[in-house]
Image (spheres, rainbow, N blue to C red):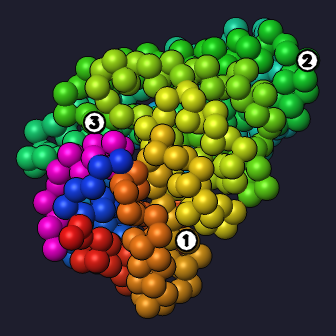
Amino acid sequence: MNVSPDWNRVLAAVKFEETDRVPLSEVLIAHDIQSQFLGRQIGPDDLAGQVEFWSSAGYDYIPLNIGMMEPGKVTGDSHVSKILKSLGQGDEPDKTDDKSWNLEVASFIHDLDEFEAFPWTELASLDFSKLENVASLLPPGMKAIGVSGKIFTMTWMLMGFNNFAMALIKDTPLLRAIFRQVAEIQLSALDVVLNMPHVGGIWVVDDLAYNSGPIVSVKHLDKYVFPWYREIARRCREAGKLFFLHSDGKLDALLPSLIDLGLDVIQPIDPTCNDIVDIKRKAGGRICIVGNVPNDMLQDGQPSDIREYVRHLLAEVAPGGGFMLGSGNSVPDWAKFENYMALRETALTEGVRA
């Protein structure tokens, strides 16, 4: 069982080449799972402990958040939430109530005056310290990935979804202004990250679909969202970095656009609404896919269920490259540790190339 990190495994998967084993890939693994794996407490500020986990568990990189929204904590510990809470903004009557800054409940920008008054400067003050400090901690062969986003999600949350949907129909100047402001913050962060030699790529986390299909029409995504992602892809390509995208939901209708804009990797191919074998066939060697052990199985299944599903992925999706194995979303703290271990151990022992 070779767990030594080697970024070349990831590069090979993206190029549809086969290497010594199928790479493992996750955008998020809960600190509780990391702690159980190492047998000691690992917290969000224990950078050395996190590196030890990701490298010894069999991953070729460590993902580190540098975006306005943190994966899994859209309204809790995210950069944007802390700013909104500290300023006491929101459209709820009780400004001291936590709901007044919660992006899932409150909206913040309803007209151009509110757009101009919004604390964009504070929002753009992103923290790169972990991504910078990890350079000296990485073992040979290992890279870091900067986790960023969310252009689509941030825009509709700041406006409130009903207002956002009406603005899409009317093509309002406010909508375009918010999209541009959010995207330019992300692009400025991207330029910083792309100049770090120990960083292998950027991972944008931006949910674009429900289980039934795209949240908004593909034509609206093509008009307002994907041009920004195409620019991210261009800058990554010029810098020799990879561009990962995480989106939940059913992706069939989005796949042609995602391939066209220049993505390298799409994750997690949500197993509740996607057939990963069919998605790989439709991708046709044009985009690497990551997934997709069901999260409900990680929570409620047995290790034997996990091993069987991983074997299915190794047999039906892994041949020919273009695949990295992981969960159907992320590995949260409510996943059974023994099920996570069944996932990684089966992949490491049975995903070996002949």
Find out whether residue 6 is within the magenta segment. yes
Earlier-in-chain disc, 3 versus 2: 2
Q: CA distance from mark 3 to mark 2?
A: 40 Å
Residue on which the image places disc 2: 170
Q: Mark 3 belongs to which amino acid?
A: Gly
Q: Which picture quadrant has residue 215? A: top right
Camera-side residue: 167 or 307?
307
Q: Relative to 27, is 227 above or below?
A: above
Q: Relative to 237, is 211 above or below?
A: below
Q: Mark 2 belongs to which amino acid?
A: Lys
Earlier-in-chain disc, 1 versus 3: 3
Question: Where's the N terminus, which quadrant?
Answer: bottom left
- Determine the residue positioned at 72% across, 44% down: 253
Question: Where's the C terminus, which quadrant?
Answer: bottom left
Magenta segment: 1-15
- Determine the residue positioned at 49% across, 87% down: 305
Note whether residue 167 is visible: yes
Earlier-in-chain disc, 1 versus 2: 2
- Determine the residue positioned at 20% across, 46% down: 8
Q: Mark 1 belongs to which amino acid?
A: Asn
Q: Relative to 171, is 206 above or below?
A: below
Note whether residue 58 is visible: no
Tag 3, which secondary structure? strand
Residues packed near mark 2 inside 10 Å, few (<14), some (14 to 19) or many (20 plus): few
Q: Which picture quadrant has residue 137? A: top left
Camera-side residue: 281 or 213?
281
Tag 1, which secondary structure? helix
Residues packed near mark 3 inside 10 Å, few (<14), some (14 to 19) or many (20 plus): many
Residue on which the image places disc 3: 200
Q: CA distance from mark 1 to mark 3?
A: 27 Å
Percent across and percent down for residue 48 are 17, 52
Percent across and percent down for residue 156 are 74, 32
